[in-house]
Image (spheres, rainbow, N blue to C red):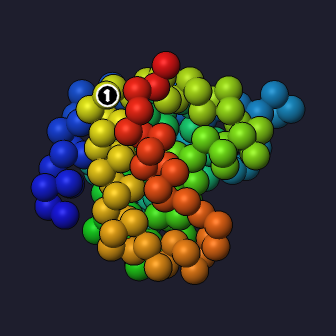
Amino acid sequence: MTNLKEQIIEAFRDVPYPGDDNLVDKDPGGFNIEEEELEERFRGKHWQALTLATLHNSGDSFFTPAAYHFFLPAYLLVSLSRFYEADVLPYDTVCGLDPMFNAECGRMRKFRKTQGLFTKTQRNVIRSFLEFLRDEYGEEFENEFADYELDRLIEFYSEDYP
């Protein structure tokens, strides 16, 4: 696992901070409380300094594609190192990486933009993260999501994204 953590850190090392004004997608109907809390919680922070407490219940679906790209390694690392303590965070992290889940939630356009930001190296490390979860915690995923298919996601991240 240590090698995978190092790979995640290295793969995302040079992703720039998206800027304080580019953290959350503003709801066209008005800025809601979840968006405000997320923006406040992550404003000015580097992903390497985030704790489980900061990430827990953080609503990463409100991130802009650039913010999701920047903060994703924190979610990956916490999911690896504190899987059980992190409660639903590993599952939420995997859901955010799933094109089918994003399509069901009406977020495909945003998902495509985010996927377009990942380098080949980052996609490979995401694939390795998913393989680790499958190999180490596969039963937990089967219990939580009876029809969840980590293998399908592993295949998705094994391919080049258009």
Question: Can you give x and y, in whole percent of width and height, for residue 144 in the image?
Answer: 60, 76
In the image, residue 126 above or below residue 66: below
Please identify the quadrant where the N terminus is shown: bottom left
Residue tagged 1: 120
The answer to whether residue 50 shows anywhere in this view is no
Question: Can you give x and y, in whole percent of width and height, for residue 113 in the image?
Answer: 56, 24
48 left or right of 109 in image: left
Question: Can you give x and y, in whole percent of width and height, for residue 94 in the image?
Answer: 51, 55
Residue 26 vs residue 123, the one in the foreground = 123
Q: Residue at x 14, y 61 (%)?
A: 2
Question: Can you give x and y, in whole percent of width and height, for residue 146 in the image?
Answer: 64, 73
10 Å neighbourhood of mark 1: few (<14), some, or many (≥20)? some
124 left or right of 143 in image: left
- Identify the element where label 1 is drawn: helix
The answer to whether residue 84 shows anywhere in this view is yes
Q: Residue at x 49, y 78 (%)?
A: 140
In the image, residue 64 above or below residue 75: above
Residue 134 vs residue 78, the one in the foreground = 134
Residue 15 vs residue 4, the one in the foreground = 4
119 left or right of 117 in image: left
Q: Residue furthest top?
A: 162
Q: Residue at x 38, y 39 (%)?
A: 158
Q: Residue at x 68, y 26 (%)?
A: 109
In the image, residue 55 above or below residue 24: below
Q: Residue furthest right?
A: 29
Residue type of the residue flagged with mark 1: Lys
Quadrant in the rendering for residue 16: top left
